[in-house]
Amino acid sequence: MERSTSGSTTKQSVAIHRQRRVWEARARNWNHHASNNEGLRTVVAAVIDTATTGLADGEPLGTVVDLGCGSGQLTLALAKRATKVLGVDVSASMLRELEQRAAAEGITNVECLVSPIERLSLPPGSVDIVVSNYALHHLRDPDKAVAVAAAARWLRPGGRLVIGDMMLGRGADAADRAVIADKVRQLARRGPGGWWRVAKNAVRFIVRIQERPLSRSAWVALVQRSGFVDVQASAVVHEAAVVSAVRAGSPTTEAARPADSASNAAAKATGDGASAPA
Ligand SMILES: C[S@@+](CC[C@H](N)C(=O)[O-])C[C@H]1O[C@@H](n2cnc3c(N)ncnc32)[C@H](O)[C@@H]1O
């Protein structure tokens, strides 16, 4: 028993180390890539739309946590309506990019925390919305489940979880097979460069080292198992989908919560001993 726990911890540490290395190297160019990639922009818009659905115009979002925030595609947009947004990322360089962008836009209610999602700890019931875009597929499957269960604890009753990500199984259902076939056709049309990418993606897909997507139905099941209700899933573009859910419990119990606890959530956040980048 002890051995399997420490084996799992070691695998988790290896996965975190790998993500940090990969994303430290990509941080400088990520913002340019993300803002010029129409597909990614569409998914970001879908996550924002889902996170704000049902709120009256101008109604504040409260405290938001963005898991794997990168250079802030979701963070900065949501900060304009939130009390505070805590951006969490394993890469300090990504967060430096985010801080620079926030400063350039005069946004002052964003806090950055360098931490693996797997090791993030926040006070229970202290968050209104947890969002994540294109980050959770990098986590190992057991760590995805732990992250979703943790999000259920951090959210206040009635709080919302919104995940945008590549949601693709390995071809077990027709929807997956259609997405895979479409992707292969698109890349193959580009000639030798595209064939090379098909081969590279196929290896990644099979080995699941860097990218470990789950199908939409697997995400729905995982979120339901963590005690969320009103779980909804919708396809966005290509392999991307958005899953949203509501933390069970009556929002009215929030009235009993100390008024400042939500807005202090970010201040009390802890990661793996790391702190916000200077
Ligand atoms: C594809 S980028 C997406 C960034 C941003 N959410 C966006 O929409 O542009 C993935 C991000 O997840 C972060 N990431 C990957 N694994 C992580 C982990 N285990 N913990 C925290 N962040 C992680 C990376 O550093 C990177 O910034």
Image (cartoon, rainbow, N blue to C red):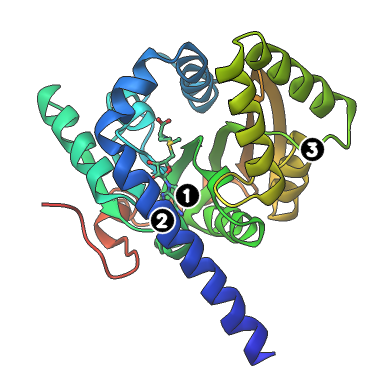
Please say if the residues under marks 2 and 1 sit with CB atoms less than 8 Å apart.
yes
Residue type, mark 3 in image:
Ser
Q: Residue at x 79, y 39 (%)?
A: 170
Residue named by callout 2: 257
Residue type, mark 2 in image:
Arg
Left or right for 257, reference 162? left
Q: Quadrant of ligand 1?
A: top left
* Quadrant, the N terminus: bottom right
Q: Is residue 58 visible?
A: no
Q: Residue at x 43, y 52 (%)?
A: 19
The residue closer to the viewer here, 193 or 254, is: 193
Residue type, mark 1 in image:
Glu
In the rendered image, residue 138, in percent from the top left (x then y), is placed at 54, 47
Q: Quadrant of residue 74?
A: top left
Circle 1 or circle 3, nearest the eye = 3
Which element is circle 1 on?
A: helix
The residue closer to the viewer here, 175 or 264, is: 175
The residue closer to the viewer here, 108 or 214, is: 214
Which numbered marker is on residue 120? Answer: none
How many angstroms separate mark 3 from mark 2 (CA)? 34 Å
In the rendered image, residue 6, in percent from the top left (x then y), is placed at 57, 83
How many angstroms separate mark 2 from mark 1 (CA)? 5 Å
Left or right for 175, reference 12? right
Q: Earlier in the sequence, mark 1 or mark 3?
A: 3
Residue named by callout 3: 217
Q: Earlier in the sequence, mark 3 or mark 2?
A: 3
Q: Residue at x 71, y 30 (%)?
A: 232
Which element is circle 2 on?
A: loop
In the rendered image, residue 246, in percent from the top left (x then y), is placed at 62, 40
Residue named by callout 1: 254
Circle 3 or circle 2, nearest the eye = 3
